């Protein structure tokens, strides 16, 4: 029998077989342990090395792409359908994908309309009741029709989409899909064939007719139906035809047959030929030209509407709201709900160039340096969700956002406030070269009262109306806008408002001597001051709520405050401040905060009481603000934009008169009378006019603040090479933790090895 060889020479060679077995097992376990420790340490070192090299939220090399990076908060837009899309978060995409008839010159101030899908801005001609043409200066009472004959650019083409794809026989490939054929496709880009076609005037006719649809919210139908000839009656016809189509289908059916508006003519909209659109209005309405610059008058190709009406499309999130189709500079190429949206350059976008003229100061600011260059400059616009403001600011400071948001005009104000807080921040911002252009513009923020609510609304009896009015007036005095958004929340600061019409448009009385709101303010030693809380309490007592309690029941008055954002830490301070304003009167305020989409749904159904709202001008005319209080534009009744559902016959009559007037003394007189009515009724606590400012990185060019110009992304230019350099410079790897970790790993390895050697050399008796 061959003797077993000892594992090692030395004392352990004399150990019994059991000891040698234990030693062998320990050795094997030691090797395994060392490998695991080495792997663990190597993993830590590798992870640390990678984190030290790059903390970018984007793929490696993304900073070198010709891409504009921004963010959005809370949720994806609710509507991107051009008939329904109206809010600022929606406009961030809609105005870059669709191209309305008109737009605004990017740089000129005051704002100047120019042709976009149309070749030029046209003046209407007027007809009397017999169809006889009238002179341009005819009195408005003689005008029965205003006629716009609008020439459409030739050669405009839609972005690629499967709805346009045809086979060799000229038949649409994807217009007769079954649910099974659609399968699990969730993007237009998953279809094998894409197509395009030229825009024609009939596409605008289809879009105008579509304002009468009963299938989605059409927020401007109430306004347009009063002006576009025959649109109100047309809506009744469409509702009847829609009912026929849906007969026998469940009410909640997601699949609804195609509602083909081509079948029914509309008096107020027709195509004279393939590239001439005629729109007929009831009487004179000078402000109509501004509506032609909104996406409500973007073209709608019937093929896309028919494509999205097929079985299973809604279920698969294939609709206008996720995948809009237009002739604008960009197209939606990636849509991840509540996470990420990507717009890429439309390969068929028309020849368009950067302006060579601007306002005073634009040349010195470098805003004319790209004169005549082809638009758009960037290949893609990428928006990722970042729900809270602080992380968004930090990503901007690190250089990973080219601008925080594309549609918000308060970021520049916030960064300017930060910059003035300390010398250190000032030096840091200056060194990084942030571009923070500031300006004044036309927008507002306010607190509104729902006129349908029995406590703060209109009231059902004359006595109740008077009580409710005094309650609204008392609250309007108590909310100290000068304190809140003049001194406390300076990053969202502005000037306290005294009515619904902002400074900067014709007819506004804001800031003019003697034109303060007498309900909420008074003159003291020649200065305008907010009325005292004692005066507000006196009104509250007259309203039937002395010290904030119901005079009849003794119960405390509790009011609901519907806020349009999820309350993040930065929003909580504002809501707490608002609660304190009501507490001055002894009123308890219950904050009901939701995300914006849920808030919109609540307001649409009239389930709000007191609410926070903002308005960014669609066009530079007072009518765009005064229509927010026009009765037939009620949000809950008629799906309009009067979120307070305010209704006053005298105001409504004056508003109708206003719509026929050009700027001048008569228009001013009418506006002054309307102002007096709404100040007394107090459907809003008038809020404040916000300062506007943008925030850009140093490598982003051509940024100019604007509320009215919405398609700004086509003008922004990015120096990607500078961005890559700056990101590397601002995000240096911090090596000392890695070195410390490596030193610690070496110590652990040495101790482990020493322990292992000691165990390896030990005898069974511990010698």
Image (cartoon, rainbow, N blue to C red):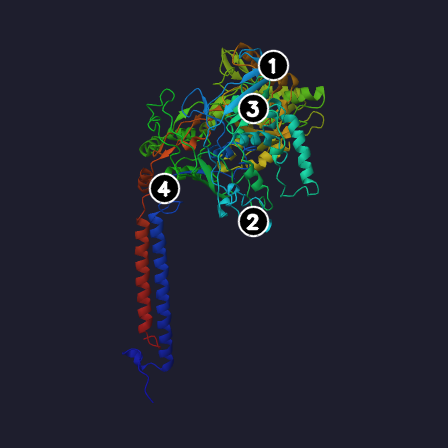
Helix, strand or loop at label 2? It is helix
Q: Mark 1 points at which residue?
A: 128
- Judge by depth and name the residue closer to the eye, 63 or 123: 123
Q: Element type at marker 4? A: loop
Which residue, given by chain and number where applicable, does mark 2 sit on? 182
Q: Name the residue under label 3.
A: 279
- Identify the mark at residue 65; answer none if there is no mark: 4
| Number of the label disc, if any, that sits on residue 684 | none
State the SS at label 3: strand
- Sequence-first disc among 1 and 4: 4
Of marks 2 and 3, the one in the foreground = 3
Give the spatial CA distance, label 2 vs label 3.
Answer: 38 Å
Disc 3 residue crowd, few under 14, some 14–19, many 20+, Cα 10 Å: many
Question: What is the quadrant of the N terminus in the image?
Answer: bottom left
In this rendered view, identify the residue nearer to me: 276 or 402: 276
Up/down of 637 relative to 193, above or below? above
Q: Where is residue 168 in the image (x, y as percent from the top left)?
A: 50, 45
Q: Which of marks 3 and 4 is in front?
A: 3
Question: Can residue 464 be seen from the camera position used here?
Answer: yes
């Amino acid at each position: 029998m061959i003797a077993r060889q000892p594992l090692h020479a030395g004392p352990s060679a004399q150990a019994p077989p059991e000891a040698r077995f234990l030693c062998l097992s320990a050795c094997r376990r030691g090797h395994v342990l060392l490998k695991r420790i080495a792997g663990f340490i190597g993993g830590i070192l590798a992870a640390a090395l990678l984190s030290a090299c790059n903390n970018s939220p984007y793929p490696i090399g993304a900073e070198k792409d010709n891409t504009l990076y921004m963010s959005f908060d809370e949720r994806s837009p609710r509507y991107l359908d051009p008939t329904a899309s109206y809010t600022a978060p929606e406009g961030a995409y809609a105005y870059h994908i669709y191209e309305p008839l008109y737009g605004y010159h990017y740089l000129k101030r005051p704002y100047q309309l120019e042709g976009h899908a149309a070749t030029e801005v046209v003046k209407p001609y007027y007809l009397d009741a017999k169809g006889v043409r009238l002179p341009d200066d005819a009195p408005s009472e003689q005008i029965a029709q205003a006629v716009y004959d609008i020439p459409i650019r030739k050669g405009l083409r839609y972005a690629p989409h499967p709805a346009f794809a045809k086979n060799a026989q000229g038949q649409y490939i994807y217009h007769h899909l079954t649910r099974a054929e659609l399968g699990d496709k969730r993007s237009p880009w998953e279809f094998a064939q894409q197509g395009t076609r030229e825009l024609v005037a009939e596409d605008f006719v289809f879009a105008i007719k579509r304002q009468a649809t009963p299938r989605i919210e059409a927020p401007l139908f109430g306004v347009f139906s009063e002006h576009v000839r025959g649109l109100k009656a047309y809506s009744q016809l469409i509702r009847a035809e829609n009912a026929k189509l849906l007969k026998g289908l469940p009410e909640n059916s997601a699949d609804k047959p195609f509602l083909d508006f081509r079948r029914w003519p509309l008096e107020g909209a027709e195509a004279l030929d393939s590239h001439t659109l005629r729109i007929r209005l009831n009487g004179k309405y000078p402000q109509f030209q501004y509506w032609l610059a909104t996406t409500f008058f973007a073209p709608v190709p019937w093929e896309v509407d028919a494509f999205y009406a097929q079985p299973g499309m809604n279920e698969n999130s294939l609709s206008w709201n996720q995948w809009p189709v237009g002739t604008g500079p960009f197209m939606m190429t990636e849509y991840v709900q509540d996470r990420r949206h990507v717009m890429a350059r439309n390969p068929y976008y028309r020849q368009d160039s950067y302006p060579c003229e601007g306002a005073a100061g634009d040349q010195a600011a470098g805003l004319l340096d790209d004169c005549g260059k082809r638009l758009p400059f960037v290949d893609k616009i990428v928006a990722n969700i970042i729900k809270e403001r602080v992380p968004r600011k930090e990503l901007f400071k690190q250089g990973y956002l080219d601008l925080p948001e594309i549609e918000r005009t308060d970021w520049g104000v916030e960064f300017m406030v930060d910059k003035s807080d300390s010398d250190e921040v000032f030096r840091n911002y200056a060194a990084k070269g942030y571009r923070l252009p500031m300006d004044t513009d036309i927008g507002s923020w306010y607190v509104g009262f729902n006129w349908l609510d029995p406590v703060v609304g209109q009231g059902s009896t004359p006595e109740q109306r008077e009580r409710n009015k005094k309650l609204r007036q008392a609250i309007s005095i108590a909310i100290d806008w000068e304190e809140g958004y003049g001194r406390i929340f300076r990053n969202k600061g502005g000037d306290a408002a005294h009515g619904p019409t902002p400074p900067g448009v014709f007819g506004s009385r804001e800031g003019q001597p003697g034109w303060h709101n007498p309900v909420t303010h008074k003159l003291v030693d020649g200065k305008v001051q907010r009325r005292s809380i004692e005066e507000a309490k006196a009104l509250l007592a007259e309203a039937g709520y002395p010290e904030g309690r119901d005079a009849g029941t003794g119960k405390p008055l509790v009011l609901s405050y519907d806020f349009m954002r999820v309350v993040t830490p930065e929003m909580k301070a504002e809501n707490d401040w608002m609660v304190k304003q009501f507490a001055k009167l002894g009123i308890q305020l219950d904050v009901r905060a939701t995300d914006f989409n849920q808030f919109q749904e609540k307001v649409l159904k009239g389930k709000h009481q007191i609410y926070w709202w903002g308005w960014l001008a669609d066009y530079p005319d007072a009518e765009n603000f005064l229509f927010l209080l026009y009765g037939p534009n009620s949000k809950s009744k008629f799906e309009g934009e009067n979120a307070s559902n305010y209704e006053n016959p005298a105001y409504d009559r004056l508003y109708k008169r206003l719509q026929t007037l050009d700027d001048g003394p008569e228009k001013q007189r009418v506006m002054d009378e309307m102002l007096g009515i709404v100040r007394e009724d107090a459907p809003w606590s008038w809020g404040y006019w916000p300062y506007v400012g943008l925030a850009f990185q140093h490598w982003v060019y051509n940024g100019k603040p604007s509320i009215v110009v919405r398609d700004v992304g086509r003008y922004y230019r990015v120096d990607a090479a500078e961005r890559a350099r700056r990101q590397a410079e601002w995000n240096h790897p911090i090596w000392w933790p890695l070195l410390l970790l490596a030193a610690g790993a070496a110590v652990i390895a040495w101790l482990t090895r020493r322990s292992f050697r000691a165990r390896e050399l030990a005898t069974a008796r511990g010698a």
